[in-house]
Image (cartoon, grey):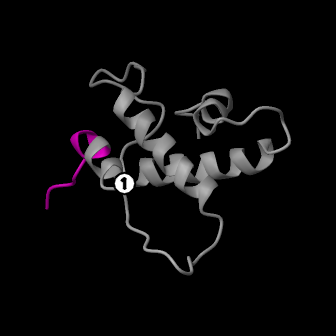
Amino acid sequence: MPSIVTLDEAKAHLRVDGADDDADITLKLEAAQDAAVQYLNRPVPWADAAGIEVPVPASVKAAVLLLLGDLYAIREASIVGTIHTVNPTVERLLSPYRKVPFA
C-alpha cells in the first residue's frame, strides 16, 4: 500500500530522533494507515472522480498520525490502573471522506 504518511513525518510527529525505532514505527505506521483505509473504504493512492491521483486530505493524514501515536504510546493489549478512552477525533477527521456503500 502506498504511504499516506512518510516515515520522516511519523518520526517528527512522535518526536523520535535516530533510527533505533524505525522498524517498530514502520510497523505501527502501516497498521495505522491500514486502519484508516479500511474505515474509509477507499483505495490508496487517493484519486479523484476521473481517476487522477490527488494528494490525500490533511485531515486523513492527521488521523493516521493520531492512530500512530496511540499505537506507539500504548504497546500493550491492556492498561492497568488507569482509564483509557478512545479519541473521537480520528473518526471526526475520517468520516467526511468515508465511502459508504448503498444497499
Is residue 36 or residue 25 the one in the foreground? 25
Which residue is farthest left? 103
Residue 1 located left or right of residue 40: right
Q: Residue at x 40, y 19 (%)?
A: 54
The single residue placed furthest to the right in the displayed view is 20
Report the predominant secondary structure element of the magenta stretch: loop
Magenta stretch holds residue 100 = yes
Q: Left of 101 or right of it: where is 47?
A: right
- Which residue corresponds to the image point at 53% horizontal and 80% vertical from the top-left? 81
Q: Quadrant of residue 61?
A: top left
| Residue positioned 56% across, 76% down in the render | 79
Amino acid of disc 1: Tyr
Residue at x 36% of width, y 54% of height: 39
Give the tally of numbered discs. 1
What element does badge 1 sit on?
A: helix
Magenta stretch bounds: 94-103
Q: Where residue 17 sits: x, y (%)?
A: 77, 32
Q: In what quadrant of the picture does the C terminus appear?
A: bottom left
Q: Going by the image, does 64 lie left or right of 22?
A: left
Rate crowding at label 1 as few (under 14), some (14 to 19) or many (20 or more) other CA atoms within 10 Å: some
Residue 12 percent across, percent down from the top left: 63, 30
Residue 60 image point, x, y percent? 39, 36
Quadrant where the N terminus is found in the figure: top right
The stretch drawn in magenta includes residue 37 = no
Q: Quadrant of residue 55?
A: top left
Q: Which residue is mark 1?
A: 39
Measured from the top left, where is residue 6 in percent x and y? 62, 30
Q: Is residue 26 above or below residue 86?
A: above
Q: Nearer the viewer, residue 77 or 45?
A: 77
